[in-house]
Amino acid sequence: MQIFEVLADPVRRRILELLAPGEMASGEVVEVIGAEFGITQAAVSQHLKVLRESGFATVRAEAQRRLYSVDAAGLQAVDAWIGQFRNFWEPKLDALATEIARGKRERRNAPMSKRSGKRA
């Protein structure tokens, strides 16, 4: 369950959101997270380290910069754990999609006076 302990922290979740579109320099992460959460560079670095060590982020050096990105391995572990519950909600979501489609079809096929809300 360590993966969920890592994701339980709002700072780490926000860092992953920042990294989702692509690589980001550690300084940029520190700037955003520091402004949003009011924490120091050292604290942000510790969060980045936890994400790295738990398989949620990777880092590569480019000259003096450290570029972070999301590591799919951590997210795959989350997906695998959640996957065991998909059979619980997928039929419900399929049923919801069917009801939505049925409602759209009924509105589309309704006489014009019923669609506009006016009485015939």
Image (cartoon, rainbow, N blue to C red):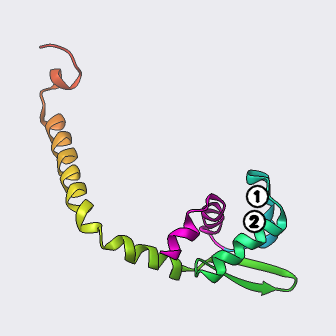
Q: Main secondary structure of the magenta part?
A: helix
Amino acid bearing label 2:
Val
Amino acid bearing label 1:
Val
For the residue pair 118 and 13, the one nearer the viewer reads as 13
Q: Are the two marked residues, 2 and 1, in contact with CB atoms closer than 8 angstroms?
A: yes
What x and y, as percent, mark residue 107?
Answer: 18, 34
Q: Residue visible at 74% across and 59% down?
A: 33
Which residue reaches farthest right? 64
Residue that numbered label 1 is attached to: 32
**Above or below, comparing residue 112 to residue 91 in the picture:** above
For the residue pair 8 and 72, the one nearer the viewer reads as 8
Query: What is the spatial separation of the Cα atoms under label 2 and label 1, in whole angstroms?
Result: 5 Å
Relative horizontal placement of residue 12, taking residue 78 as reference (left or right): right
What x and y, as percent, mark residue 26?
Answer: 78, 72
For the residue pair 18 and 41, the one nearer the viewer reads as 41
What x and y, as percent, mark residue 46?
Answer: 75, 72
Magenta residues span: 1-22
Q: Magenta stretch: residue 5 in it?
A: yes
Q: Residue visible at 79% across and 53% down?
A: 38
Q: Quadrant of the C terminus?
A: top left
Residue that numbered label 2 is attached to: 29
**Secondary structure category for the residue under label 1:** helix
Q: Magenta stretch: residue 92 in it?
A: no
